Image: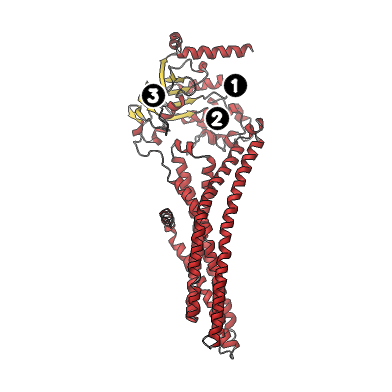
Amino acid sequence: MTSSYTAIFKRLAVLHKPYKKRLALAFLGMVVTAATEPLVAYIFKILLDHGFVEKPTFPLWLVPIAVIGAFVARGASTFLTTYMMSWVSTRLLNGLRREMFDRMLHVSIDFYATHTVGRIINSIMFEVQQIMEMVTKLFISMVRCTLTIMGLLAYMLYTSWTLTLAAFILMPLMIAVVRLTGKRLKKLNKDSLDVNAQLTQVIEETTRAQQVIKIFGGQEYERSRFEERADALRRYSMRMTSTFAATVPVTQIMTACAMSVMIMMALIQASHQQITVGDFISFFTCMIALLAPLKQLAEVNGPLQRGMAAAEAVFKLIDSPVERSGGKELEHRASGQITFENVCFSYPEQEKYALNKINLKVSPGETIAFVGMSGGGKSTLVNLIPGFYSATEGRILLDGEPIEDISLKSLRAQIAMVSQHVVLFDDTIAANIAYGDSAPDKERIEAAAKAAHLTEMIAALPDGFETLIGDNGSRLSGGQRQRLAIARAIYKDAPILILDEATSALDSESERAVQAALDQLMLGRTTFVIAHRLSTIERASRIVVLSGGSIVEIGTHDELLSQHGAYANLYHLQFSKNAVNVEM
């Protein structure tokens, strides 16, 4: 067994520790089940030697009591084992899923750049189930089967040690078969899990992108992607099945060879009156009974390899690095002063700076607009403020405190954000507005909805604020979804506001209404605005022009226009485009 397997087993053993009493009961059930196997063989011996060959020397009513009692004990112990193992495995399953989900909530943004949604869903829903199947199969099959084999072999040794020695020929041969198939199964299972994750990703993307698929006629492309991965998964399944299935008949053939040798030996011993009929039948009964646990032990290899491959993936997700912890808690509401001091930033595994030597001091209540061509660093810069990423060089200060010294929870409590990529939850309108508040205030919810010009829309809905909005607000229009996200920011009432194309999905009339609400919302708050439509930021306190990750101009709208620089060029270019659109 490799060191990685040993580490995984140790980790799984630690997870089982809180349930040791239940596992002890399951183990007791296995002991009783294993003990009934040689007991049945012993009953046959007594019946044959002292009931059929000779006149019965015991009351006949003891026969049904002994036989029925043995099987009742076996059934009760089997039920106890199965129930207890199911009790433990379901709790372990939920525990692992909780750990994985909790880790998803606390990993850095970088994690989602390198892990697909399909892969994450596959790990939480499928791979963790494989671990539980492995644990249950291993514990029940290996422990119970081992105990059963030990009990049967002990009785067989007691009956005839010479015949029993022949049975031991089976063990090294079985171990060789299991080792040969184990390596192949491990690789096949790893590859199968990867293909399964790819298939999950295709299904997830197809479900999410229905409009794009339909409008661009991508049905055949998506069908071919699905069929390619589904067929690859089928091929891996068949390879695993053929490898695994070959183990069972080989094991059975080896068992048959050993049994044929033992039958010949028993016949020789019987001819010399060294063994009775009862001894032979009970011994042969034990041999037949050995087949089932030996077969189960041979079949353990498949679930073991699947479970180990899944465990590696699950524990890798659980061990993913999380965002920084610690830092001081802010005791009071921040005033909103933000200072950038020589801030540089580069994305992981990229040498080029996305931001280079950013120096900017923002006073409380000031509105700063970031403009520039796409890829200039606008979104990257505002993503540093809530600590989604950490500056590679330099520092950012909130009210004179480096944000790296402030706990992320406390820092983010001071910030509200509305992004161009609206994210809503399949819940009620009220729950989406008050998202993150454990004790929602109905009056604040209504006030936020009114400020975002949602009152009329909500009043027209059958359940009002309790209306479910569907997956990511699918039952709402684009403008309604955007205003609902704005209402969520209004409800939070944070001193710092980040607006990343907050009005991008609104028509002209809605934009004017929401812009008025935003103007009211921004009063007294430090606001960072990213807007491609320059007409929406003309009243900003200062406009910062970014190009290639560096600040090239700073000033008011009028000041920058008078400089005839980068901002003026952007403004006139956009104005001329708008003029052409109006004429058309």
Mark with earlier residue (1, 2): 2
Q: Is residue 164 or residue 514 the one in the foreground?
A: 164
Residue 257 x %, y %: 56, 72
Disc 1 + disc 3, Cβ < 8 Å: no
The residue pinned by badge 3 equals 356
The residue pinned by badge 2 equals 484
Please tell me how many numbered marks the rendered image carries: 3
In the displayed structure, does residue 434 sit left or right of residue 405? right
Task: Identify which residue is drawn at 57% across, 14% down.
Answer: 577
Closer to the eye: label 1 or 3: 3
The residue pinned by badge 1 equals 507
Closer to the eye: label 2 or 3: 3
In the displayed structure, does residue 23 sit left or right of residue 584? left
Q: Amino acid at mark 3?
A: Asn
Task: Identify which residue is drawn at 46% across, 26% down.
Answer: 379
Mark with earlier residue (2, 3): 3
Q: Is residue 456 or residue 251 the one in the foreground?
A: 251
Residue 167 x %, y %: 50, 74
In the displayed structure, does residue 470 sit left or right of residue 90? right
Q: Amino acid at mark 1?
A: Asp
Q: Is residue 549 or residue 386 the one in the foreground?
A: 549
How far is the residue under mark 1 from the one under mark 2?
A: 15 Å
**Residue 135 against residue 325 in the figure, above or below:** below
How far is the residue under mark 2 from the one under mark 3?
A: 35 Å
The image's colour scheme reads: secondary structure
Disc 1 + disc 2, Cβ < 8 Å: no
- Quarter that holds the C terminus: top right
**Residue 391 against residue 308 in the figure, above or below:** above
Q: Amino acid at mark 2?
A: Leu
- Residue pushed farthest bottom? 55
